[in-house]
Amino acid sequence: MITPKINEFSTTTVCVNTVRSILHKHGIKKYNSVSKPYLSPRNFKQRKNWARLHQSWSEIQLDKVLFSDESSFTVRLKKLRKRVWRKQGKYFDVQNIVPMFKSGYVAISVWAVFSRLGSTPLVLIEGTLKQGQYKKILLEEVVQLASKFYGGPKNIVFQQDNCGPHKAKSMKAFLVANDVWMMYQTAQSPDLNPIETCMGDAQTATT
């Protein structure tokens, strides 16, 4: 693509090898592009506002932030034979069957939180995350973690992204009722949440 552009405006025709040699001489080589979330002008503005809002936070304040994220993993299933106790002819009963998938893979979704002082275990999400399930997770995991390390939910800042169940009015009211301070993540900004980096590394390791 570069050579035709040069020849379009040049009085002397140059070949691909000549252009490549000159580029290499100046330390320019061809690499695969890097994929990153698309940032619209609105995203840029939101990220700048977020950074300005939090740039003066002290280490003590950041220590209180609980970073959360949910992520999906595609896991390869191991082929195994499972021996079961059953009556003759009952081989198709549900409890006697080991599920089999054509692709040999199964997708699972998990949720977790970590902070400087501690973390929750990976919580398996059943189907699509709904408000009821999310409230249950927060009560069982976030409130428990906050009580263990911070003296209660009122002493933490809970970070989450902007997916549907997180932004619902009922969820906001639920968090306020449980004395949880919120830190919302701007859209298209996984780099602002360190646990997303951990989830990304885990996805790479399992593929």
Image (tube, rainbow, N blue to C red):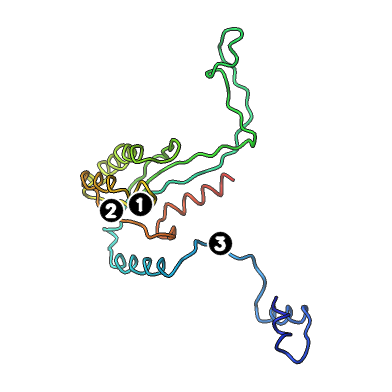
Is there CB contact under 8 Å for labels 2 and 1? yes
Cα distance, mark 2 to mark 1? 8 Å
Is 156 placed left or right of 187 in the picture? left
Q: Residues within 10 Å of mark 3 (few under 14, many from 20)?
A: few
Q: Residue at x 67, y 71 (%)?
A: 30
Task: Please state the horizontal and vertical placement of residue 76, each as a whole percent of the image.
Answer: 60, 38
Q: Residues within 10 Å of mark 1 (few under 14, many from 20)?
A: many
Residue sitting farthest toward the top: 88
Mark 1 highlights which residue? 160
Vertically, is 7 above or below 50?
Answer: below
Q: Residue at x 44, y 40 (%)?
A: 128
**Three-letter amino acid code of the residue under disc 2:** Met
Cα distance, mark 2 to mark 3? 30 Å
Q: Secondary structure at mark 1?
A: strand
**Three-letter amino acid code of the residue under disc 3:** Ser
Mark 3 highlights which residue? 35
Q: Secondary structure at mark 2?
A: strand
**Three-letter amino acid code of the residue under disc 1:** Gln
Cα distance, mark 1 to mark 3? 23 Å
Total numbered circles:
3
Task: Please state the horizontal and vertical placement of residue 50, each as a whole percent of the image.
Answer: 33, 65
Give whichever of discs 1 and 3 has the lower sequence position. Answer: 3
Residue sitting farthest toward the bottom: 11
Mark 2 highlights which residue? 182
Give whichever of discs 2 and 3 has the lower sequence position. Answer: 3
- The N terminus appears in which quarter of the rendering? bottom right
